[in-house]
Image (cartoon, rainbow, N blue to C red):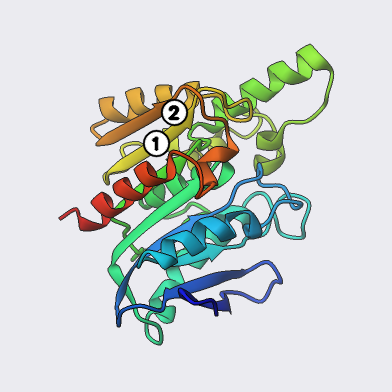
Amino acid sequence: MNNKCLLKRISYGTNNNQFGDLRIPVAGEGPFPLAVIIHGGFWKKQFGLEQMNDFAEKYASHGIATWNIEYRRVGQDGGGWPGTFLDSARSIESLKIIAEDHPVDLKRVIIIGHSAGGHLALWLAARNKLLSNSILRQQDRMLEPKGVISLAGVSDLILMYEIHQWKEKLFGVIENPTRDLIGGKPNEYAQRYAEGSPKELLPIGIPLVLFHGALDVNVPIGLSVNFKKIAESAGDNVVLKTFPNIEHFELIDPMSEVWSIIWDHTVSLLNNT
Protein backbone atom coordinates (compact mmCIF):
# COMPACT_ATOMS: atom_id res chain seq x y z
CA MET A 1 0.00 0.00 0.00
CA ASN A 2 1.14 3.51 -0.75
CA ASN A 3 -0.35 6.52 0.98
CA LYS A 4 -3.07 6.96 -1.63
CA CYS A 5 -4.29 3.49 -2.62
CA LEU A 6 -4.44 -0.13 -1.55
CA LEU A 7 -3.01 -2.59 -4.10
CA LYS A 8 -4.16 -6.20 -4.33
CA ARG A 9 -3.23 -8.72 -7.05
CA ILE A 10 -6.14 -11.03 -7.87
CA SER A 11 -6.21 -14.05 -10.19
CA TYR A 12 -9.17 -14.57 -12.49
CA GLY A 13 -7.89 -17.87 -13.90
CA THR A 14 -5.28 -20.57 -13.36
CA ASN A 15 -2.71 -19.40 -15.90
CA ASN A 16 0.14 -17.24 -14.58
CA ASN A 17 -0.96 -14.40 -16.86
CA GLN A 18 -4.60 -14.42 -15.81
CA PHE A 19 -4.59 -11.79 -13.09
CA GLY A 20 -5.17 -8.14 -12.45
CA ASP A 21 -4.00 -5.48 -10.02
CA LEU A 22 -6.87 -3.90 -8.12
CA ARG A 23 -6.16 -0.49 -6.66
CA ILE A 24 -8.61 0.94 -4.14
CA PRO A 25 -8.40 4.59 -3.06
CA VAL A 26 -7.50 5.04 0.59
CA ALA A 27 -9.48 8.25 1.00
CA GLY A 28 -13.24 7.72 1.25
CA GLU A 29 -15.41 4.72 2.01
CA GLY A 30 -16.70 3.72 -1.41
CA PRO A 31 -18.06 2.02 -3.28
CA PHE A 32 -15.74 3.68 -5.76
CA PRO A 33 -16.19 4.10 -9.52
CA LEU A 34 -13.87 1.79 -11.40
CA ALA A 35 -11.62 2.13 -14.44
CA VAL A 36 -10.60 -1.13 -16.11
CA ILE A 37 -7.15 -0.49 -17.57
CA ILE A 38 -5.68 -2.55 -20.41
CA HIS A 39 -2.06 -2.26 -21.50
CA GLY A 40 -0.75 -2.39 -25.03
CA GLY A 41 2.35 -3.78 -26.69
CA PHE A 42 0.81 -5.22 -29.89
CA TRP A 43 -0.43 -8.24 -27.89
CA LYS A 44 3.19 -9.51 -27.52
CA LYS A 45 4.44 -11.49 -24.54
CA GLN A 46 7.30 -9.13 -23.73
CA PHE A 47 4.96 -6.26 -22.83
CA GLY A 48 3.03 -6.47 -19.57
CA LEU A 49 0.69 -4.53 -17.33
CA GLU A 50 3.50 -2.77 -15.46
CA GLN A 51 3.61 -0.14 -18.20
CA MET A 52 0.24 1.09 -16.91
CA ASN A 53 1.17 1.13 -13.20
CA ASP A 54 1.77 4.88 -12.95
CA PHE A 55 -1.41 5.58 -14.90
CA ALA A 56 -3.44 3.30 -12.61
CA GLU A 57 -1.95 4.75 -9.44
CA LYS A 58 -2.74 8.27 -10.60
CA TYR A 59 -6.38 7.35 -11.06
CA ALA A 60 -6.61 5.64 -7.69
CA SER A 61 -4.99 8.60 -5.98
CA HIS A 62 -7.77 10.76 -7.41
CA GLY A 63 -10.60 8.58 -6.11
CA ILE A 64 -11.23 6.09 -8.91
CA ALA A 65 -10.49 2.42 -8.29
CA THR A 66 -8.58 0.66 -11.06
CA TRP A 67 -8.42 -2.92 -12.34
CA ASN A 68 -5.18 -3.13 -14.35
CA ILE A 69 -5.44 -6.45 -16.15
CA GLU A 70 -2.94 -8.92 -17.49
CA TYR A 71 -3.79 -11.47 -20.18
CA ARG A 72 -2.17 -14.22 -22.22
CA ARG A 73 -0.29 -12.74 -25.15
CA VAL A 74 1.20 -13.85 -28.45
CA GLY A 75 4.21 -16.04 -27.77
CA GLN A 76 2.74 -17.48 -24.59
CA ASP A 77 0.82 -20.72 -24.19
CA GLY A 78 -2.80 -19.94 -25.00
CA GLY A 79 -2.09 -16.40 -26.22
CA GLY A 80 -3.34 -14.97 -29.49
CA TRP A 81 -6.57 -16.31 -30.97
CA PRO A 82 -8.78 -16.88 -29.08
CA GLY A 83 -7.05 -16.78 -25.67
CA THR A 84 -6.14 -13.08 -25.61
CA PHE A 85 -9.75 -12.14 -26.30
CA LEU A 86 -11.19 -14.65 -23.84
CA ASP A 87 -8.85 -13.52 -21.07
CA SER A 88 -9.82 -9.88 -21.44
CA ALA A 89 -13.49 -10.83 -21.29
CA ARG A 90 -12.98 -13.13 -18.32
CA SER A 91 -11.07 -10.43 -16.44
CA ILE A 92 -14.00 -8.05 -16.85
CA GLU A 93 -16.59 -10.58 -15.79
CA SER A 94 -14.51 -11.48 -12.73
CA LEU A 95 -15.38 -8.04 -11.36
CA LYS A 96 -18.80 -9.40 -10.43
CA ILE A 97 -17.09 -11.63 -7.87
CA ILE A 98 -14.45 -9.07 -6.88
CA ALA A 99 -17.17 -6.52 -6.08
CA GLU A 100 -18.60 -8.86 -3.44
CA ASP A 101 -15.56 -8.27 -1.22
CA HIS A 102 -14.19 -4.94 -2.42
CA PRO A 103 -15.77 -1.46 -2.48
CA VAL A 104 -16.20 -1.00 -6.23
CA ASP A 105 -19.37 0.21 -7.95
CA LEU A 106 -20.17 -1.94 -10.98
CA LYS A 107 -22.75 0.59 -12.12
CA ARG A 108 -19.94 3.08 -12.68
CA VAL A 109 -17.33 1.25 -14.75
CA ILE A 110 -15.40 2.46 -17.77
CA ILE A 111 -12.71 0.71 -19.81
CA ILE A 112 -9.47 2.44 -20.76
CA GLY A 113 -7.03 0.81 -23.16
CA HIS A 114 -3.77 1.89 -24.75
CA SER A 115 -2.68 0.77 -28.22
CA ALA A 116 -3.44 -2.97 -28.44
CA GLY A 117 -5.20 -2.49 -25.12
CA GLY A 118 -7.36 0.11 -26.83
CA HIS A 119 -8.36 -2.58 -29.30
CA LEU A 120 -9.35 -4.88 -26.45
CA ALA A 121 -11.20 -2.08 -24.64
CA LEU A 122 -13.33 -1.30 -27.68
CA TRP A 123 -13.83 -4.99 -28.42
CA LEU A 124 -14.99 -5.71 -24.87
CA ALA A 125 -17.67 -3.05 -25.18
CA ALA A 126 -18.75 -4.44 -28.57
CA ARG A 127 -18.67 -8.18 -27.82
CA ASN A 128 -22.40 -8.30 -27.09
CA LYS A 129 -22.78 -8.16 -30.89
CA LEU A 130 -21.15 -11.56 -31.26
CA LEU A 131 -23.39 -14.39 -32.37
CA SER A 132 -24.21 -17.06 -29.82
CA ASN A 133 -22.08 -19.63 -31.66
CA SER A 134 -18.94 -17.47 -31.65
CA ILE A 135 -15.97 -18.97 -29.84
CA LEU A 136 -15.41 -15.53 -28.32
CA ARG A 137 -18.86 -15.32 -26.74
CA GLN A 138 -18.55 -16.90 -23.32
CA GLN A 139 -21.24 -14.96 -21.42
CA ASP A 140 -24.80 -13.95 -22.17
CA ARG A 141 -25.15 -11.45 -19.33
CA MET A 142 -22.13 -9.20 -19.74
CA LEU A 143 -20.95 -6.39 -17.51
CA GLU A 144 -21.87 -3.16 -19.27
CA PRO A 145 -19.41 -0.24 -19.03
CA LYS A 146 -20.60 3.34 -19.13
CA GLY A 147 -18.05 4.18 -21.80
CA VAL A 148 -14.68 3.43 -23.36
CA ILE A 149 -11.54 5.54 -23.64
CA SER A 150 -9.17 4.44 -26.39
CA LEU A 151 -5.64 5.82 -26.14
CA ALA A 152 -4.15 5.39 -29.62
CA GLY A 153 -6.14 2.20 -29.89
CA VAL A 154 -6.08 -0.35 -32.71
CA SER A 155 -9.73 0.07 -33.64
CA ASP A 156 -9.53 -1.68 -37.01
CA LEU A 157 -7.63 -4.97 -37.24
CA ILE A 158 -7.74 -5.22 -41.02
CA LEU A 159 -6.35 -1.73 -41.51
CA MET A 160 -3.64 -2.37 -38.89
CA TYR A 161 -2.75 -5.58 -40.69
CA GLU A 162 -2.44 -3.69 -43.97
CA ILE A 163 -0.23 -1.02 -42.42
CA HIS A 164 2.20 -3.65 -41.17
CA GLN A 165 2.10 -5.38 -44.56
CA TRP A 166 3.28 -2.17 -46.17
CA LYS A 167 6.10 -1.91 -43.64
CA GLU A 168 7.12 -5.47 -44.43
CA LYS A 169 7.13 -4.69 -48.14
CA LEU A 170 9.01 -1.41 -47.82
CA PHE A 171 11.58 -2.33 -45.20
CA GLY A 172 11.85 -6.08 -45.51
CA VAL A 173 11.15 -6.66 -41.83
CA ILE A 174 8.83 -9.63 -41.43
CA GLU A 175 6.65 -8.59 -38.52
CA ASN A 176 2.88 -8.24 -38.47
CA PRO A 177 1.50 -8.30 -34.91
CA THR A 178 -2.12 -8.34 -36.11
CA ARG A 179 -1.48 -11.42 -38.23
CA ASP A 180 0.18 -13.05 -35.22
CA LEU A 181 -2.78 -12.22 -32.96
CA ILE A 182 -5.41 -13.61 -35.33
CA GLY A 183 -3.32 -16.46 -36.69
CA GLY A 184 -3.19 -15.42 -40.33
CA LYS A 185 -4.23 -12.97 -43.03
CA PRO A 186 -7.69 -11.40 -43.42
CA ASN A 187 -8.39 -13.44 -46.56
CA GLU A 188 -7.49 -16.61 -44.66
CA TYR A 189 -9.44 -15.88 -41.48
CA ALA A 190 -12.21 -13.50 -42.49
CA GLN A 191 -14.50 -14.70 -39.71
CA ARG A 192 -11.86 -14.14 -37.03
CA TYR A 193 -11.26 -10.58 -38.20
CA ALA A 194 -15.02 -9.98 -38.29
CA GLU A 195 -15.42 -11.18 -34.70
CA GLY A 196 -12.25 -9.64 -33.30
CA SER A 197 -12.18 -6.15 -34.80
CA PRO A 198 -14.16 -3.33 -33.13
CA LYS A 199 -14.84 -1.71 -36.50
CA GLU A 200 -16.64 -4.83 -37.68
CA LEU A 201 -18.91 -4.90 -34.60
CA LEU A 202 -20.31 -1.36 -34.85
CA PRO A 203 -22.40 0.21 -33.50
CA ILE A 204 -21.10 -0.35 -29.99
CA GLY A 205 -23.89 1.57 -28.34
CA ILE A 206 -22.08 3.38 -25.51
CA PRO A 207 -20.07 6.64 -25.48
CA LEU A 208 -16.60 6.30 -26.99
CA VAL A 209 -13.71 8.71 -26.50
CA LEU A 210 -10.65 8.37 -28.73
CA PHE A 211 -7.33 10.05 -27.99
CA HIS A 212 -4.57 10.08 -30.57
CA GLY A 213 -1.33 11.98 -31.13
CA ALA A 214 -0.35 13.13 -34.59
CA LEU A 215 3.27 12.06 -33.95
CA ASP A 216 2.28 8.43 -33.34
CA VAL A 217 4.41 6.12 -35.51
CA ASN A 218 3.21 2.91 -33.85
CA VAL A 219 -0.53 3.21 -34.44
CA PRO A 220 -1.18 5.90 -37.08
CA ILE A 221 -3.74 8.53 -36.16
CA GLY A 222 -5.72 7.67 -39.29
CA LEU A 223 -7.12 4.59 -37.56
CA SER A 224 -8.94 6.72 -35.01
CA VAL A 225 -10.02 9.32 -37.58
CA ASN A 226 -11.50 6.63 -39.83
CA PHE A 227 -13.07 4.74 -36.94
CA LYS A 228 -14.83 7.84 -35.64
CA LYS A 229 -16.34 8.51 -39.06
CA ILE A 230 -17.61 4.96 -39.49
CA ALA A 231 -18.80 4.60 -35.89
CA GLU A 232 -20.77 7.83 -36.07
CA SER A 233 -22.33 6.73 -39.34
CA ALA A 234 -23.42 3.57 -37.54
CA GLY A 235 -25.05 5.66 -34.82
CA ASP A 236 -22.43 5.72 -32.07
CA ASN A 237 -21.57 8.71 -29.91
CA VAL A 238 -17.84 9.29 -30.52
CA VAL A 239 -15.47 12.01 -29.34
CA LEU A 240 -12.05 12.21 -30.99
CA LYS A 241 -9.32 14.30 -29.35
CA THR A 242 -6.19 14.74 -31.45
CA PHE A 243 -2.92 16.37 -30.41
CA PRO A 244 -0.40 17.74 -32.92
CA ASN A 245 2.69 17.31 -30.71
CA ILE A 246 1.95 14.04 -28.90
CA GLU A 247 3.40 10.61 -29.70
CA HIS A 248 2.27 7.11 -28.80
CA PHE A 249 3.45 6.71 -25.21
CA GLU A 250 2.80 10.21 -23.90
CA LEU A 251 -0.88 9.30 -23.68
CA ILE A 252 -0.19 6.97 -20.75
CA ASP A 253 2.22 9.26 -18.93
CA PRO A 254 0.36 10.84 -15.99
CA MET A 255 2.86 13.70 -16.10
CA SER A 256 2.08 14.58 -19.72
CA GLU A 257 0.09 17.59 -20.81
CA VAL A 258 -2.86 15.44 -21.94
CA TRP A 259 -3.48 13.63 -18.66
CA SER A 260 -5.88 16.24 -17.29
CA ILE A 261 -7.93 16.04 -20.49
CA ILE A 262 -8.12 12.26 -20.25
CA TRP A 263 -9.12 12.61 -16.61
CA ASP A 264 -11.89 15.09 -17.41
CA HIS A 265 -13.38 12.72 -19.97
CA THR A 266 -13.13 9.86 -17.51
CA VAL A 267 -15.17 11.77 -14.94
CA SER A 268 -17.66 12.80 -17.59
CA LEU A 269 -18.22 9.19 -18.71
CA LEU A 270 -18.61 7.94 -15.15
CA ASN A 271 -21.16 10.66 -14.39
CA ASN A 272 -23.06 10.11 -17.61
CA THR A 273 -26.62 9.00 -16.97
Q: Which mark is residue 102?
A: none
* Position of 224 relative to 106 (above/below): above
Q: Give the number of callouts.
A: 2
The residue under label 1 is which amino acid type? Leu
Q: Residue at x 57, y 30 (%)?
A: 247
- Give the residue at the far left of this rendering: 273
The residue under label 2 is which amino acid type? Ser
Q: Position of residue 155 (x, y in %)?
A: 48, 35
User: For the N terminus, which image quadrant?
Assistant: bottom right
- Element type where label 1 sits in the image: strand
Q: Position of residue 213 (x, y in %)?
A: 49, 28
* Position of 202 relative to 51 (above/below): above
The alpha-carbon separation of the residues under discs 2 and 1 comes to 7 Å
**Quadrant of res 258:** top left
Q: Is residue 256 left or right of residue 235?
A: right
- Element type where label 2 sits in the image: helix
User: For the C terminus, which image quadrant?
Assistant: bottom left
Give 247 or 146, whichever is nearer the viewer.
247
- Residue 168 visible within the image: yes
Contact, CB < 8 Å: mark 2 with mark 1?
yes
Q: Position of residue 20 (x, y in %)?
A: 56, 69
Q: Circle 1: is it few (<14), some (14-19), or many (20+) Cα within 10 Å?
A: many
Q: Residue at x 78, y 30 (%)?
A: 175
Residue picked out by circle 1 = 210
Give 29 or 89, whichever is nearer the viewer.
29
Q: Is residue 124 left or right of residue 250?
A: left
Q: Position of residue 148 (x, y in %)?
A: 37, 48
- Give the residue at the far top of this rendering: 170
Choose the circle earlier in sequence order: 2 or 1.
Answer: 1
Q: Residue at x 65, y 35 (%)?
A: 178
Q: Which mark is residue 224?
A: 2
